[in-house]
Image: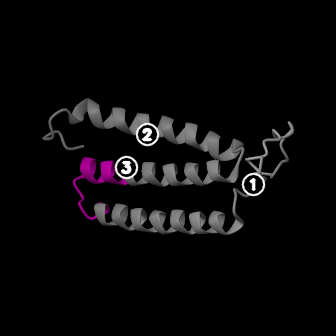
Amino acid sequence: MMSEIAGAAWVLPLTFALQGISAALILGRLVRGPRAADRVVAIDALSMIAIGVIALLALSTAQPMLLDAAVVLALVSFLGTTAFILMFRRRGRGADEAVTAPTEPMPSDARAVGEKP
């Protein structure tokens, strides 16, 4: 580890640990769902954590070439998220959401339906 970076002796291991905890919590959301949109957001968040881990590895090992991999992962993640957005927009609603009828009757306001009073 590079000890020339101010605070690197305890900050880098702490950030690795916090990102690991965050990844575990996000994996729980990915598995549980309940909707497809939740899973897409979880995948996007996991890719952002992976980008952060790659950047921290580049910092701790003093290998700036790893930052290229982080940029490529960010671009691919953006394209994947955009593809999911287009898929959900074509369906109209989320994949797991059901269209339900309202349980209470609508108020019978004559002006609301366009009739003359």
Q: How is the image coloured?
A: one colour
Asked if residue 109 is among those painted magenta in the image, a careful observer would answer no
Residue 73 percent location from the top left of the image: 42, 64
Q: What's the mark number on residue 114?
A: 1
Foreground mark, 1 or 3, reads 1
Residue 16 percent location from the top left of the image: 38, 39
What residue lies at 79% left-to-right and 46% top-to-bottom? 110
Secondary structure state at the residue bearing disc 1: loop
Residue stretch rendered in magenta on the structure: 53-66
Residue type pointed to by label 1 = Gly
Residue type pointed to by label 3 = Gly
Q: What's the mark number on residue 52?
A: 3
Callout 2 touching callout 3 (CB < 8 Å): yes
Residue type pointed to by label 2 = Gln
Secondary structure state at the residue bearing disc 3: helix
What residue lies at 64% left-to-right and 52% top-to-bottom? 37
Q: CA distance from mark 1 to mark 3?
A: 55 Å
**Dot 3 surroundings within 10 Å: few (below 14), some, or many (20 or more)?**
some
User: Along the horizontal axis of the image, is 104 left or right of 92?
Assistant: right
Badge 2 is on which residue? 19
Residue 30 percent location from the top left of the image: 64, 47
Foreground mark, 2 or 1, reads 1
Q: CA distance from mark 2 to mark 3?
A: 8 Å
